[in-house]
Image: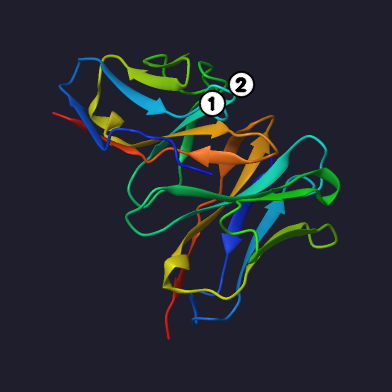
């Protein structure tokens, strides 16, 4: 069971847009709609930001959006704000009731 | 509203068994409406799915940990338990209990740090 590949870091200025990729295979990211994204601040538990590729839980700003093309999922943040500076992880269902996480991306807001 | 939090020993010696508890309140641990997962994060590292337990106790484990891990639910105590045998320093991590809805981890506990050291 391999991890999903994310860029280690990404940055953008306040107000700009940023996109993070998450590359897997046809057995995980490309398998189904069950791709999620989590935000994690240092020392805190992860928070669900996107599920089923592009759905937002209640309370998540609409600046966050998700998409997928083939075996690569993406998280986009528009209108970057200081509080968006965090680590972001993707996650995908890999069949047989198993899941796999991405390697994580540290987002810096300049 | 279902709430949950983890608790653990803090320190475990190498080769021993790590046991972590997730206490659930505001709902039944064995509800058919949701399921549970254990996820860990080594210091400075990413998230790793350990395993999942569903309604009626059906489990699934990460193949890399399957030989050493057991997840069970105690309905009388409304708790979940994670047991990991033969631990090494590589098992030092924050262990999270997460609630699952459909195929997403809907809410997470605050995590409990377990350090493996002699």
Q: Are marks 2 and 1 in contact (CB under 8 Å)?
A: yes
Give SS at disc 1.
strand
Q: Quadrant of the C terminus of chain A?
A: top left
Residue A65 picture quarter: top left
Q: Position of residue A85 (x, y in %)?
A: 26, 34
Q: Which color mode does the image show?
A: rainbow
Residue at (68% x, 58% y) in the render: B23
The answer to whether dots 2 and 1 both sit on one chain is yes
User: Left of A81 or right of it: where is B25?
Assistant: right
Residue farthest bottom in this picture? B118
Along the line of sight, which residue is nearer the eye, B104 or A97? A97
Give SS at disc 2.
loop
Does B18 appear above or below A110?
Answer: below
Residue at (50% x, 34% y) in the render: A91
Does B15 appear above or below A37?
Answer: below
Does B67 appear above or below B28?
Answer: below
- Chain name for mark 2: A
For label 2, the crowd category at 10 Å Cα-Cα, with few meaning under 14, some 14 to 19 and many 20 or more, is: some
Q: Position of residue A1 (x, y in %)?
A: 54, 44
Residue at (23% x, 35% y) in the render: A9
User: Left of A31 or right of it: where is A6?
Assistant: left
The residue tagged 2 is A32
User: Left of B58 or right of it: where is B70?
Assistant: left
The residue tagged 1 is A35
Q: CA distance from mark 2 to mark 1?
A: 8 Å
């Amino acid at each position: 069971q391999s991890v999903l590949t994310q860029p280690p870091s990404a940055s953008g200025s306040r107000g700009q847009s940023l996109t993070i990729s998450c590359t897997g295979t046809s057995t995980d990211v490309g398998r189904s709609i069950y791709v999620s994204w989590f935000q994690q601040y240092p020392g805190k538990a992860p928070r669900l930001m996107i599920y089923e590729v592009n759905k937002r839980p209640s309370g998540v700003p609409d600046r966050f959006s998700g998409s997928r093309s083939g075996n690569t999922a993406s998280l986009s943040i528009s209108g970057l704000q200081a509080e968006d500076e965090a680590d972001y992880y993707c996650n995908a269902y890999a069949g047989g009731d198993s899941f796999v996480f991405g390697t994580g991306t540290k987002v810096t807001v300049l | 509203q279902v709430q949950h939090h983890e608790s653990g020993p803090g320190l475990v010696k190498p080769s021993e068994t790590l046991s972590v508890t997730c206490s659930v309140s505001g709902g039944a641990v064995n509800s058919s409406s949701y399921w549970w997962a254990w996820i860990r994060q080594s210091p400075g590292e990413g998230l790793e799915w350990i395993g999942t337990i569903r309604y009626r106790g059906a489990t699934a484990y990460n193949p890399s940990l399957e030989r050493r891990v057991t997840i069970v639910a105690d309905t009388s105590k409304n708790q979940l338990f994670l047991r990991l045998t033969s631990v090494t320093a590589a098992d030092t991590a924050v262990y999270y209990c997460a609630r699952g809805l459909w195929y997403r981890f809907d809410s997470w506990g605050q995590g409990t740090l377990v350090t493996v050291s002699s």
